[in-house]
Image (cartoon, rainbow, N blue to C red):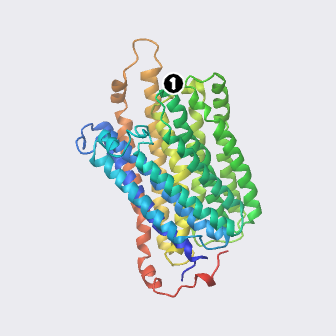
Amino acid sequence: MNTLKFQSQSVAKPYFIFALMLFTGQILFGLVMGLQYVVGDFLGDAIPFNVARMVHTNLLIVWLLFGFMGAAYYLVPEEAETELYSPKLAIALFWIFAAAGTLTILGYLLVPYSTLAHMTGNDILPTMGREFLEQPTITKIGIVVVCLGFLFNLGMTILKGRKTVINLVLITGLIGLAVFFLFSFYNPANIALDKLFWWFVVHLWVEGVWELIMGAILAFILIKVTGVDREVIEKWLYVIIAMALITGILGTGHHFYWLSTPEYWQWIGSIFSALEPLPFFAMVLYAFNMVNRRRREHPNKAATLWALGTAVMAFLGAGVWGFLHTLAPVNFYTHGTQITAAHGHMAFYGAYVMIVLTIISYAMPKLRGIGESSSPKAQVVEMWGFWLMTIAMVFITLFLTGAGILQVWLQRMPESAEALGFMATQDKLAIFYWLREAAGVVFMIGLLTYLANFLVDRKKVAVTSGMPDTSGLQTDT
């Protein structure tokens, strides 16, 4: 009962499985961090806060990259209507990347960071010590090698097959991801200059080229689950990515407010950052419009729910919560507070976590050989996971927003000696941190519920796994 169009699409499966494993680890370390906010010595000797935070954020980045790579290996052959150029290369790169990522996380946990830097050649080419880019230099080099092999594999597949807008937008976003990561190797001594180029990785990833990747995956899913004409969806995709690139690239200027750059960047950054919600709002209209115009009732209801949820939560997290503190006069007070954390949590979940879970939801039944969708019972379990995680993330965001508002009021608004210091302010925020931790526990329950849906159909998988391969005889709508 294998319903894959092309057998080489199966290389996506280990990428998706490992991504979900890392996602679970990320949330576990998030819960550890959340508890350390209010119980300062919790696991303090075994997992200091700075290590827990480093592991939490690095796992986020790495598992999303695994998810993007799995998504590309699944959809590019289907869009190009040809087998992947080299499935063996894809599997080899998986093991290289998985080994490098695992060893790096173990290094964070088992070796003092300064010792890790010395062991991995940071003295020769200094790249470590920056937020989100803490990876050892040798790991960064490995990431570049994996990216080059990955892009070569996809590029050769696209060149020999059908050219579609979805594939071209996806490969453009992936090339941008690889190119902007190269700025992580530039580590100038001047801290303002360092931060300037640091944002070339961090901002231009999450508010630039990653949006192209998200848009391409969402377009692919909507074509499959709605049956709407490709031409209609592609026109929407063009509009969305154009707005995303224009506002995202120029919106980088809202970070330059703090870097002694010319004053005009305050205006450019503020104006174009204020426009960044527009492509996300367009994505909401796009997703719901396509589902309302659907020409088929796809059996995978869970994947449709994830697709619609991605559009809505990305608009709220990246759009609305981003706009709340992006204008320079507002950011003067809110920069680096829990309001930033609130925006970051919902934006990452809505825009990137959910789009990876969307493609996994759609592709996994086919990759497991059980048809276009999992059983109705498994889909109910999956949708419970969707709602528990999504509602929990909404509350995490609201609690962090409340903490951020109080933090600004106590620590930054008073213009006299009445302003509290950082630690005194943190004590006042404890109730919000406890509530955030409780919501985090619910999120973990939601994640475990989501993972449980794969166990519901395990007998069905065992039965179908022994059937002959008929992938070359079946097609998708």
Displayed quadrant of residue 149: bottom right
Residue assigned mark 1: 333
Q: Is residue 58 above or below residue 327?
A: below
What residue is drawn where x is 64% and y is 47%?
280
Q: Secondary structure at mark 1?
A: helix
Q: Is residue 304 visible?
A: no
Q: Amino acid at mark 1?
A: Tyr
The extreme front residue here reads 124
- Where residue 393 appears, as percent x and y from the top left, is 47, 48
Q: Is residue 350 above or below residue 367?
A: above
The extreme left residue here reads 45
The residue nearer to you, when weighing 227 against 289, is 227
What residue is drawn where x is 35% and y is 51%?
105
Q: Is residue 313 above or below residue 91?
A: above
The residue nearer to you, when weighing 309 against 65, is 65
- The C terminus: image quadrant: bottom right
